Amino acid sequence: MRILYGVVGEGMGHAIRSKVIIERLLQWGHEVEIVVSGRAHDFLKKRFEGVNRIWGLTIEMEDNRISKLDTALAVLQGATTGWPENVRQYMDLTDRFSPDVVISDFETWSTLYAHNHRLPLICLDNIQAVRRLWHPAEVLRGRKADWRLTKGVIKAKIPHADHYMVLSFFDSAPRKDRTTVVPPILRPEILQATARDGEHILVYQTSPTFSQLPDQLRLFGDIPFKIYGLRRDITEPVVEDNLTFCPFSEAGFIDDLASCRGVIASAGFTLIGEALYFGKPYLATPVRGQFEQVMNARYIEHLGYGLQDEEFDEFSIRAFIGHLDEFAQNLQSYPRHDNEPVFEKLQILLDQAAAGVPLGFT
């Protein structure tokens, strides 16, 4: 089959998991054309042929919070050149590539293409969990207005897919039909690594909001911390007291993740899935104003896998460290899967699309 695969460019997690799916599609013998925006374009362009750059929404951050004004300005500025480029890409793709089915990882351009050409559309992402799954009252308490608003945005961005494959690290039943819940997609490097019990706590933060974090961590002098993201200009590890600032290294990061006692990071879905797979407790610092991250963080605490704190301070760290053994014990029951459940479901849907069977009936 000829497959058009759309990948949203905001956040690298979408590109990382799309790489895993696209590699399997190519192994199955399908022809894949990719449309992607942002940093994700460069990531996928290095790894596949048929990667097309399109314009996509850019979210601007300030003080670990989404800046609505700066985001709106970025959208307006980008649209002046972005929309004409998207139209050009649309016409070019229509002329040279005739897809049989479209897969979208929360990407709007490919979704519109599927609707305009009346093609089967499979939505495969984690964002749909906000809208298409049931959530306990504890997770939504005090944030129902944000939940309702976010549901509306998600529905407008990816409407009327033939089937939704919802990636989730928590066990929740679908609240809508044409929905299948599947476990997080894991990189081969994660599946090949072995979890170990080390002494350090892994810290991953890139926001300038956390510039005071090193001083807070120094208060826990008997605990080593390995920190990624705060010093992007270093090429070698820098040791200061109980802190080790690490340069970016995929292999080094995965090894430190697999061997840590716990993780302190934002509430992005990809890293959460990898940390829980290794059985590592998690202190989540969600981006304020980003409900999907707030929801992820609350689920971590609700399930007993760690803690969450939108403000984040010394007391959060102290509470997290004091309960590491308890969180690790709870994580022993976390269901660990490889990617086969995702592949099996996707294969069924593609077979149905090829046979002309409605994807809502599985």
Image: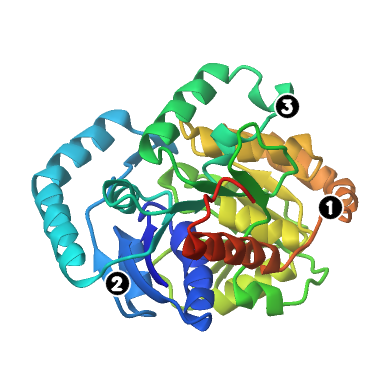
Question: Where residue 14 appears, x then y in whole percent?
Answer: 46, 58
Amino acid on which disc 1 is placed = Leu
Q: Which colour scheme is used?
A: rainbow
Position of the N terminus by quadrant: bottom left
Q: Quick one: SS at disc 2? A: strand
Residue corresponding to mark 3? 136
Q: Can residue 313 be seen in this view?
A: no
At label 3, which amino acid type do we have? Pro
Q: What residue type is labelled 2?
A: Val
The Cα–Cα distance between marks 3 and 1, rounded to whole angstroms, is 20 Å
According to the image, label 2 marks what residue? 51
State which mark lies toward you, 3 or 2. Answer: 2
Residue in view at x 44 percent, y 35 percent: 154
Q: Nearer the viewer, residue 346 or 247?
A: 346
Q: In this view, does 348 lie above or below 312?
A: below
Q: Label 1: state its secondary structure.
A: helix
Q: In which quarter of the image is residue 93?
A: bottom left
Q: In this view, does 229 lie to the left or right of 185?
A: left
Residue 356 image offset from top left, x and y in percent:
48, 58
Give the spatial CA distance, label 2 vs label 1. 39 Å
Given residues 339 and 228, the one toward you in this image is: 339
Residue visible at 48% across and 29% down? 151
Looking at the picture, tell me which residue is in the foreground, 297 or 80: 80
- The residue where tag 1 is placed is 331
Give residue 56's mark.
Answer: none
Q: Position of residue 147 (x, y in %)?
A: 53, 25
The reply, left or right, for residue 164 in relation to residue 331 is left
Q: In this view, does 319 lie above or below 95?
A: above
Q: Do the residues labelled 3 and 2 touch (CB within 8 Å)?
A: no
Few, some or many residues within 10 Å of mark 3 (<14, 14–19, 20+): few
- State yes or no: discs 3 and 1 in contact (Cβ < 8 Å): no
